[in-house]
């Protein structure tokens, strides 16, 4: 059996960007379907966020906001996109109240209340509820593996329903891609484990260009105590506590990190410094220490200083009496599909919003800008897709999906062997990406990474699945390899260090590289690179 879904606009992804796009497309008269790999509004980067937005509001001037964003992005941002973010951010965020989101304005941004302990659930839960009331259809637990093309135009998608163990076919007049990033390609990440870069692969195969894929942001301080959740460590602990190596040296002071707050304005530099200490043998089992004893003692006003409750650090880690272990963690991808301020990717019928788009953040993202981006550009992409769909006709897509449906049958029909276990392949990929294409890079390691990717790609015909969940992993794997290759190739191409991209063999910024690395699928089927 094949699930068939028809709508004017198909939105791929049910995080903040996808939900905001769906609501806007419906408001412009389109019938809308939203497909996601998880239950709507769950298991995405929005829901696990802290729920804080940075925007030109509450006294923060739009020009200052723009300057800060481009400065942190090391000048590589698409200025057109940042100008839209600066001009529209405040109004778009306050508009969320219309959809049931409880927005609290404060100087330089706003925030939402946590729901069930998750700050981001205060965003996605009311948006999902509002969308359902408006008649927007949700199709959950489906991994989309291919955009369907009628000539140069995107007319739908095909995927696999891991819950019901059956294919799913989507026919639409326009598609908004809001599938998030690729943080789960790394061994240590605070991103949901299904964020394996599907959106980047889908747009690449459809003929879109991608930029800045070498720029992967790592949050510098995440809890790394054995058996403990990887809670992010923010203010005031990161500012008032001491971040030290095994010798007791103050790491920010050692590396001359002065842009404060550290976790907002120096994420790239602090991540790099911490990892260099670990790789240089001055860590403790792959970690460094945060000494926050003086911060905790006598304080009852800390509430939540991280993504975890203060009580956890006091009661379980005894942070009032001893330092605790931390290490960087993969947090965000700055790169993505090239799209204009309306979400137009240049591929007819295909629009994009959120982390899957590159250009807004340049070489490094300023803290708090990610959630603002998804709301501003989610709305814009939804409106653009609805307008495109109003002038288009829906076509039958069954024949366009035939080869992909046959591929699904092939995977389910293969014999079982250990080399064909998709979970094992993904585990190997994550380990290699962490050590060879992570925070600290160099040419030989990146070339070795590319060789490993090619070896894994040769093993793809042996991947098998005996369940819906295993099928999900088997279908994610080839897309993940494509995205890993994008990151490694772009990192090898950029022979300098800038923002979140650091190479030991090219350790300084080079003004000749104040331009993006652009990727696309060549006519020969191979990855082609150019400089924007």
Image: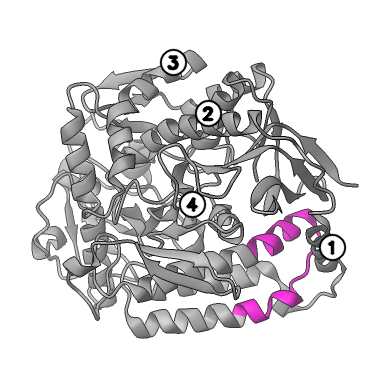
The answer to whether marks 3 and 1 mark residues whose Cβ atoms lie closer than 8 Å is: no
- Residue located 12% across and 65% down the image: 249
Instruction: Classify residue 136 by image quadrant.
Output: top right
Task: Give whichever of discs 1 and 2 has the lower sequence position.
Answer: 2
Residue 281 position by quadrant: bottom left
Contact flag, marks 1 and 4 (Cβ < 8 Å): no
Q: Which quadrant of the structure image shows residue 306?
A: top left
Residue 446 % position (x, y): 40, 79
Is 56 magenta? The answer is: no
Earlier along the polypeptide chain: callout 3 or callout 2? Answer: 3
Q: Is residue 499 left or right of residue 380?
A: left
Vertically, is 83 above or below 245? above
Q: Between 296 and 405, which is closer to the camera in this rendering? A: 405
Mark closer to the chain start, 3 or 1 = 3
Cβ atoms under marks 3 and 4 closer than 8 Å: no
Asked whether 74 or 512 is in front, the reply is 512
Report the residue marked by disc 2: 383
Could you say whether the residue bearing mark 3 is in a helix, strand or loop?
helix
- In this picture, residue 459 sits left or right of residue 265: right
**Residue under pointer 1:** 406
Left or right relative to 353: residue 68: left
Alpha carbons under labels 3 and 1: distance apart: 46 Å
Q: CA distance from mark 3 to mark 4?
A: 26 Å
Q: CA distance from mark 3 to mark 2?
A: 19 Å
Residue at the spot of label 4? 181
Instruction: Name the residue tied to disc 3.
Output: 97
SS under mark 4:
loop
Question: Looking at this view, is 311 or 34 the one in front?
Answer: 34
- Kindly tell me whether residue 50 is visible in this rendering: no
Numbered disc 1: secondary structure = helix
Q: How many numbered callouts?
A: 4
């Amino acid at each position: 059996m094949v699930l068939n879904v028809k709508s004017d606009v198909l939105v791929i992804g049910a995080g903040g960007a996808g939900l905001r796009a769906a609501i806007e497309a419906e408001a412009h008269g389109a019938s809308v379907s939203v497909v996601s790999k998880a239950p709507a509004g769950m298991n995405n980067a929005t829901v696990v966020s802290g729920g804080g937005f940075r925007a030109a509001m509450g006294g923060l001037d739009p020009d200052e906001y723009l300057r800060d964003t481009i400065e942190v992005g090391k000048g590589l941002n698409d200025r057109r996109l940042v100008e839209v973010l600066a001009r529209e951010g405040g109004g778009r965020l306050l508009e969320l109240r219309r959809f049931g989101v409880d927005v609290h304005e404060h100087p330089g941004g706003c925030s939402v209340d946590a729901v069930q302990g998750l700050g981001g659930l205060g965003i996605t839960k009311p948006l999902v509820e509002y969308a359902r009331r408006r008649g927007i259809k949700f199709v959950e637990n489906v991994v989309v593996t291919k955009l369907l093309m009628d000539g140069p135009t995107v007319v739908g998608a095909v995927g696999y329903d891991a819950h019901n163990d059956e294919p799913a076919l989507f026919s639409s007049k326009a598609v908004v891609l809001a599938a998030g990033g690729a943080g789960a390609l790394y061994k240590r990440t605070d991103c949901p484990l299904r964020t394996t870069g599907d959106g980047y692969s889908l747009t690449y195969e459809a003929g879109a260009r991608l930029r800045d894929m070498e720029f992967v942001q790592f949050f510098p301080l995440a809890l790394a105590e054995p058996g403990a959740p990887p809670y992010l460590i923010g203010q005031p602990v990161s500012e008032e506590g001491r971040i030290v190596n095994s010798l007791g040296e103050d790491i920010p002071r050692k590396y001359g990190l002065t842009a404060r707050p550290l976790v907002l304005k120096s994420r790239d530099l602090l991540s790099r410094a911490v990892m260099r200490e670990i790789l240089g043998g001055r860590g403790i089992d792959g970690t460094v220490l945060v000494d926050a004893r003086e911060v905790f003692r006598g304080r009852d006003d800390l509430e939540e200083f991280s993504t975890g409750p203060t009580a956890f650090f006091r009661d379980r880690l005894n942070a009032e009496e001893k330092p605790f272990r931390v290490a960087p963690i993969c947090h965000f991808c700055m790169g993505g599909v090239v799209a204009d301020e309306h979400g137009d990717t240049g591929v007819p019928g295909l629009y994009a919003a959120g982390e899957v788009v590159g250009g807004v953040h340049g070489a490094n993202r300023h803290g708090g800008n990610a959630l603002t981006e998804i709301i501003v550009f989610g709305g814009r992409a939804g409106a653009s897709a609805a307008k495109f769909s109003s002038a288009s006709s829906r076509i039958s897509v069954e024949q366009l999906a035939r080869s992909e449906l046959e591929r699904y049958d092939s995977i389910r029909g293969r014999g079982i062997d250990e080399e064909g276990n998709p979970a094992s392949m993904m585990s190997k990929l994550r380990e290699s990406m962490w050590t060879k294409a992570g925070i600290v890079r160099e040419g030989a390691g990146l070339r070795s990474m590319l060789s490993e990717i090619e070896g894994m790609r040769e093993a793809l015909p042996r991947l098998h699945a005996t369940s819906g969940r295993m099928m999900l992993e088997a279908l994610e794997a080839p897309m993940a390899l494509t995205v890993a290759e994008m990151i490694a190739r772009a990192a090898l191409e950029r022979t300098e260090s800038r923002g979140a991209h650091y190479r030991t063999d090219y350790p300084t910024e080079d003004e000749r590289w104040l331009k993006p690395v652009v990727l696309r699928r060549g006519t020969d089927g191979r990855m082609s690179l150019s400089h924007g």
